[in-house]
Image (cartoon, rainbow, N blue to C red):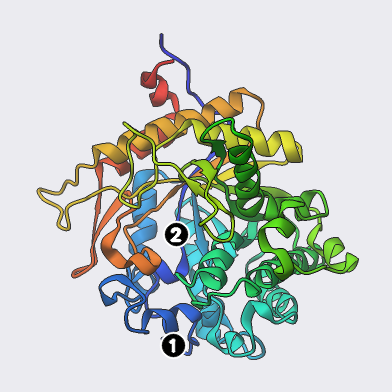
Amino acid sequence: MTVDRTFPAGFLWGSATAAYQVEGSSTADGAGMSIWDRFAHTPGLIADGDTGDVACDQYRLYRQDVALMRELGLQAYRFSVSWSRVLPQGRGAVNPAGLDYYDRLADTLLENGVEPLVTLYHWDLPAALDDRGGWLNPDSADWFSDYANVMYRKLDGRVKTWATLNEPWVVTDGGYLHGALAPGHKNRFEAPIASHNLMRAHGSAVKAYRAEGKHRIGLVVNLEPKYPASQDPADLAAVARADAYMNRQYLDPVFLGRYPEEMTEIFGEAWPTWPAEDYALIAQPIDWLGVNYYTRNVTRQDPASWPLKATSVRQRQATYTETGWEVFPQGLTDILVWVRDRYGDIPLSVTENGAAFFDPPQAEDGRVQDPLRVSYLRKHLAAVHDAIAQGVKVEGYMVWSLLDNLEWSLGFSKRFGIVHVNFATQARTPKDSARFYAQVVASNGAVLADEGA
């Protein structure tokens, strides 16, 4: 049986990247250092000693990349702004050259029929602000809204869709709790403070946008549906903790004005009591929500696993990506429906979805064959369509990622791109997945009908 997978009229098809992962020239033309510049240049923290000093060189090659987006028929490009490129000290004096780069990028996208979608913060805090405590400093909410206002005043109108933060869970879990990501802290007491200040910063930037902007602003979170390994009460409790920590911690305060009750159980004495005015700030109404989805988690109790006392169970006979994530398209449908059921009919966009599979380091004969990624995209796009069929308001899909890039602490060892990058020459070669995705875009999903029921 063939299933019609045509998407609603006006559905927005695009791709996504992040500044430090693709731009390069991170301290060029007056830009300041970010925490990722520091982290990457600390020996032993990034695989193979890789850094984002050059990355995909998009700072210089952006016109070439926009032409590639046009060739593929992409309708939108979700990119992030390097805060320290625009404000070298994180606050105060603006760097005109840095701001001009994003001005030119937005214009070039629009000239090529590609809508710019801007994320204000994708993990690269200015190092000068980290010296002041970073996200542990309560003033960080004001720093962020002041920076946001600089961008609103420059780009709002040409940019009609804004996101404040990308994946605050990753910022704090990787950066403040486990030390795997910048700024590399490992502290149970710091993580809740950093998370809370990130959410205060989000609320402050939304509030600033209401005074300055005229279009839409929202938040982007990474969500991972949690399924119990068994119906044992201990496993069910572990699922509740895991869900609260990763999913509800960042959405409940925005939509429900509170944190999940499990947070106190998870962090114990490290979980603070927050003032009522903070909740009011965080709960500023947003216009849309971005959902980043990569995998699910089958969860069981594990008393030795800190701090959740829960761990994931690897599934037998399942496909896993190079980053060790199970390929599970149904989880994308489930999480989109869950967001709607828990938080209401807010417009959603899948702002990241993709996979790292082995790709050859060099393109041969002008072609890079990546059948596993093609299959991944086909099945996950069908999953998005299934959520829409269940009444979820999904407005767009941004494949992660446009380009192979610096995969944070994994360096260049993992390739997520639909476009192959030869990092020695910066040559770009669309993979088979890019050609497939171009067909999806051109047909508004109708080509997915081959997936069947």
The residue at 38%/36% (across/down) is 315
Q: Rounded to the nearest whole Å, what is the CA distance between mark 2 and mark 1?
A: 21 Å
Callout 2 amino acid: Thr
- SS class of the residue under badge 2? loop
Q: Nearer the viewer, residue 225 or 152?
A: 225
- Farthest residue in the left direction? 365
Foreground residue among 436 and 259: 259
Residue plotted at (49% across, 77% down): 184
Identify the residue under disc 1.
Answer: 29
Mark 2 or 1: in front is 2
Determine the secondary structure under disc 1: loop
Quadrant (top left/top right/bottom left/bottom right) for the N terminus: top left
From the image, which quarter does the C terminus lie in?
top left
Residue 21 x, y percent position in the rendering:
40, 67
Determine if residue 282 is in view. Answer: yes
N-term-proximal mark, 2 vs 1: 2
Relative to 201, residue 400 above or below: above
Residue receiving disc 2: 17
Mark 1: amino acid = Asp
Q: Residues within 10 Å of mark 2 (few under 14, many from 20)?
A: many
Position of 406 with respect to 294 (left or right) is: left
Q: Is residue 61 above or below residue 236?
A: below
Q: Residue at x 74, y 38 (%)?
A: 342
Left or right: where does residue 262 sit relative to residue 297? Answer: right
